[in-house]
Image: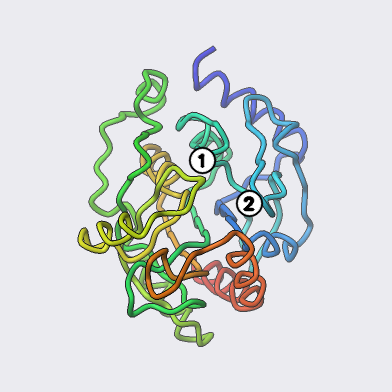
Amino acid sequence: MDLSEKLNESAIVLDRFTQGFLPEIGIILGSGWGPVADRIQNPRFVSYADVPHMRESTATSHIGRFVFGELSGKKVMVMQGRLHGYEGYAAEEVAYPVWLMKKMGVHTLITVNAAGAVNESFCVGDYCLMRDMINFSGRNPLACLDADKLAFRFVPLKDAFNPSLRDVVKEVAAQIGAVMREGVYLGMLGPSFETPAEIKMFRGWGVDSVAMSVVEEVIAARHVDISVIGISLLTNMACGIGDSNPTDEEVLEVSKQKEKQSFALISGILERL
């Protein structure tokens, strides 16, 4: 069974669960962002385990389900917990739910995560808007014949993160008083945190933030012409900056402290889309 056939099967199941709901905006909620989905109105919940060809989320704090409903007047399809390569999933499996969003009608994707600050002028608790990215995972979801059957796989990524939508994010951040940095994001495979030597190297490359997700999702989204917004909550300084030695507990604690503002940010963006 090829990728298109799998997506058709998945979409039929989702359509049955949601009774024909047609989303317009996709949201992927990474570490610490899950509570945003709890604010969705008229929610319809679908566990990843109930969707054919979907993998399950095993990461800490990732519930592992789709939530369909309304948020700030927009029809949304939300991943309450994402998939990662470090869970043992292939790049195309990580990308699969993004392609499925397109199949369901999504035209814009907001992907958010927790990240470490590589830029020493940034602070824990700031947000960082992704202006560009470096895929340092060693993988690409388009490196398979099925992807080329779905859409042309030689995808230009000059504006992987939509410039006009980045302006929207900055306007919302200013309105709600959130510190919104902007920079280059680097995605690694994980699950181990980066070494001080790696962070030093990344800084020399012009990297501003680093984490273990997002890049494969962005490539998949642009592959099928979905516009992308990427935002990180900077939950820690990267390893080797000062005495920083990040842990998963630290990431989740900072995320919890910023929960209210993170929702205000997502909500404000949706109002303007």
Residue at 58 percent across and 39 percent down: it is: 104
Which quadrant of the rendered structure holds the N terminus?
top right
> Residue lying farthest top?
1
Q: Amino acid at mark 1?
A: Val
- In this orientation, which residue lies closer to the viewer: 74 or 265? 265
Residue at 77 percent across and 46 percent down: it is: 45
| Residue at image mark 2 | 78
The disc at residue 257 is none
Q: Amino acid at mark 2?
A: Val
Q: State the image coordinates of residue 226 (x, y, percent, origin top left).
A: 42, 46
Q: CA distance from mark 2 to mark 1?
A: 11 Å
Residue at 42 percent across and 63 percent down: it is: 239
For numbered disc 2, what is the local secondary structure? Answer: strand
Can you say whether 46 is above or below 134 in the image? above
| Residue at image mark 1 | 98
For numbered disc 1, what is the local secondary structure? Answer: helix
- In this orientation, which residue lies closer to the viewer: 159 or 138? 138
Q: Quadrant of residue 27?
A: bottom right
Q: State the image coordinates of residue 203 (x, y, percent, origin top left).
A: 26, 63
Q: Is residue 44 left or right of residue 159?
A: right
Q: Mark 2 or mark 1: name the one nearer the start of the chain.
A: 2
Q: State the image coordinates of residue 52 (x, y, percent, origin top left).
A: 67, 25
